[in-house]
Amino acid sequence: MEKEAIIRFERVTKIYDGQVVLDDISFDIERGKFYTLLGPSGCGKTTILRLIAGFTEPTEGTIYFHGKPVNHIPANKRQVNTVFQDYALFPHLNVFENVAFGLRIKKKKQAEIREKVMEALRFVNLEGYENRSVQEMSGGQRQRVAIARAIVNEPEVLLLDEPLSALDLKLRTEMQYELRELQRRLGITFIFVTHDQEEALAMSDQIFVLNKGKIQQSGTPKEIYDEPVNRFVADFIGESNILRGVMLKDYLVEFAGKRFMCVDKGFRPNEPVDVVIRPEDLQITTRAQGKLQVRVDSQLFRGVHYELCCYDEDGNEWLVHSTKKAEVGEEIGLYFDPEAIHVMRISEEDGEKIDEN
Amino acid sequence: MKTSIRNVYLLPYVVWIGIFVVAPILLIVYYSFFDIEGKWTLSNYKMFFTPIYLKMAASSVWYALLVTFFSLLIAYPAAYALTKTKHKQLWLLFLILPTWVNLLLKVYAFLGIFGTYGLANAILAAVGIGPKQILFTDFSFVFVSVYIFIPFMLLPIFNALEELNPSLVDAARDLGASAWTTFRRVVFPLTLDGVKAGCQAVFIPSLSLFMITRLIAGNRVITLGTAIEEHFLVTQNWGMGSTIAVFLIIAMAAVVAVTGNRKRG
Ligand SMILES: Nc1ncnc2c1ncn2[C@@H]1O[C@H](COP(=O)(O)OP(=O)(O)O)[C@@H](O)[C@H]1O
Ligand SMILES: [Mg+2]
C-alpha cells in the first residue's frame, strides 16, 4: 500500500496584493522523510512553510493533514513546529524558558517540563546553558535553542526556514550533518528550506525545486541532479553546460552544429530542445579524438579538479571539470559518452527568457 | 582639546537647563521655607502633613492613577489596532493631531459638549435617558483628562509595538499559544517599556492638573495642582504653594525612578 501522506497540498494558490506567490501547487509529504524546498529568493518557499504552519491561509486550494482539510485551523492547533529564519527566540526569557514555552502552554507538570527541556537541550548539545540569556548566545547556539524549542513539543513535522543561512561555512557544514542526524534519531518529518543547492543535495530524501511560485521538479537529489526536467533546474542545480538543440529523431540530437548519439527519446521529430552536459562528464582529449573542438580560454585549480572555461567555433561556452591540466590558449578536443547528454523539453517560461535576451 | 570643543557645544543646553529648570526648582525650595509674612519657618512643611493637604495629595494621586489607567486601557488596544492598519502613519498623525490644539480650547470645547444644552445631553435625551448633570462631575473630569492625555500614552506604546519582531508572535502561536496567551506572555512583556514611558508621560502631568479641574470639574476635584494655583494667585501664600510644589517634584522624581529603568542590557 502507498504510504499515507501526513500533509497534502491540493492545487494551492496564494495571492498577496494581486501578486501570485504560489501558483497551483500540489504535493504530498510522507512520514519520517527529510524534504527540502529549494529555490531562489522570493520564489515562495517561506510562504509554503507559513501555509503549513497555519500563519496564513491559501487563496485557493486545500491543505490536508492526515486527510482532513486544515485551511482554517489556526497555527496553535497544528501538530507542526517551526524553526524560524531569524530564530525568533523570546528575548525576555532565558534558554530554559524559551524551550519550555510550548510545554507551559500545554500546562504540563513542572517536573515533566524540567525533564523534557533538559532532554531537548541535551539533544542539541546545549547542556548547562539553561540559565543563559538568549541574547548572550552565538548564532549557532541560538539556532540550537530554536531547534530544541521546536522538538521539545514532539511535532509530527518540523519546519526549518533557511536555518543555516546565517552561519559561517564551517559551522554550516557541521550543522548540516547534525540536522540530518537529528532527523534520523527523531524519526519525524523535516521540511527544510534553502536556496543553496549543495545543501539540498547533501541533506534531503526528497527535493522540491521551486521557481516563481511553481514546483519545477520534485525527486530525490540524484534524480534532480541527473535528470533535470528543464533549463531552470539544470542551471540551478550545480554548474552545467546548457545549449539549444534540435531532437532530430529518437536517440539523435543536434547541437553546436553537430549531430550526436544520445539515450533520450519520445520527442517530436525536429523538436527544439535544451541540452545539458555536466562539466564533470566532459573529458579532455586531442582535437582528433574529441567530439567537440574547443579552445581553452581560462583555467582555475579547484583542489580536486581543474575548472576550464572553453569556447567552440560557434562561440558556445563549455565548462569542463578535469583532473588533467590543459594550457590556456590550447586547442583541445572534448569527449563525452552518449549517456552524458541530457535532453530537456523547452518550457514556455524559458522560451520567453530566450526572446528577451 | 576635543572635550573643550564639545563643552562649548553643550553650553547653550547647560545655560538653558540652568535658567529654566535648576534655578526655578532651587527658588521653589527656597520659598518653601518662608511663611506668608516673609519669615523663615518650617511651618509650611508641618502644614502639609495635616489631613487637609494629605487628603488633597491622596486625591491627586488617585485621579492621576484613574486618568493613567483609562488612558492605558484605551491607548494600548488603539495602538495595537493601529499597527495592523494600512496607512498607520497617517492614522497616527490624526490621533496625535489634537495635541497641537491649545489645551484651553479643547477644554472649552468640552464645556460646550457636556453643558446642559450640549451635544452629550442632546444624545442622552434622544435615547430617552434624559438630560443629566455631566459637567462638574468626577466623570467629566476623568473623561476630559483622558482625552487630553491619550496621545502621550499612544505614541510610546505604538513605537514599542512597531519595534516588536512579528516573528515572535508567530513563534508563540506556533508553540501552541492562543491569541490571548501570546499577548500576555510575549507581546505585553516586550512592549512594557513603551507602557512605562506612556504611564510616565500621563501620570506625572496629571498629578498637577489645575485648569481642567476648575473648568470641567468645577472645583469639585481639588488636586495639588489646584492648591498651588490657589496659593500663588489667590491667597498669595507663596511659601505654602512652594511647599506643595516641592512634594510634587519629589513625587515626580519618584515615579521616574521607579518606572525609568528602560533598556536593560
Ligand atoms: N505578507 C506578505 N504580503 C505581501 N507579499 C508577500 C508577503 N509574504 C511574502 N510576500 C511575497 O511573496 C513572494 C515570495 O515570498 P517568500 O515566500 O518569502 O519567498 P522565499 O522564502 O522563497 O524567499 C515575495 O515576492 C514576497 O514579496
Ligand atoms: Mg524565505
Image (cartoon, grey):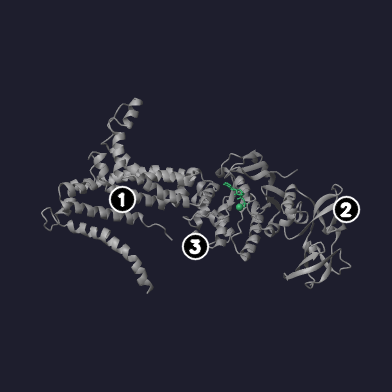
**Does dot 3 land on a helix, a strand or a loop?**
helix
Identify the chain of the residue marked 3, using the numbered disc in the image.
Answer: A
Q: CB of mark 3 within 8 Å of CB of mark 2?
A: no
Query: Same chain, marks 1 and 3?
Result: no
- Residue A251 image label: 2
What separation in Å lies between label 1 and label 3 (alpha carbons)? 36 Å
Query: Same chain, marks 3 and 2?
Result: yes
- Which image quarter: residue A126? bottom right
Identify the chain of the residue marked 1, using the numbered disc in the image.
Answer: B
Circle 3: residue type: Glu
Q: Which residue does the numbered mark 3 point to in the structure image? A: A136
Identify the chain of the residue marked 2, using the numbered disc in the image.
Answer: A
Q: Which residue does the numbered mark 1 point to in the structure image? A: B204
Q: Nearer the viewer, residue B138 or A356?
A: A356
A109 to the left or right of A35? left
Circle 2: residue type: Tyr
Q: Nearer the viewer, residue B54 or A5?
A: B54
- Which image quarter: residue B131? top left
Determine crowd level at label 1: few under 14, some 14-19, many 20+ residues with C-alpha closer than 10 A: many
Query: Same chain, marks 1 and 2?
Result: no
Determine crowd level at label 3: few under 14, some 14-19, many 20+ residues with C-alpha closer than 10 A: few
B255 to the left or right of A16? left
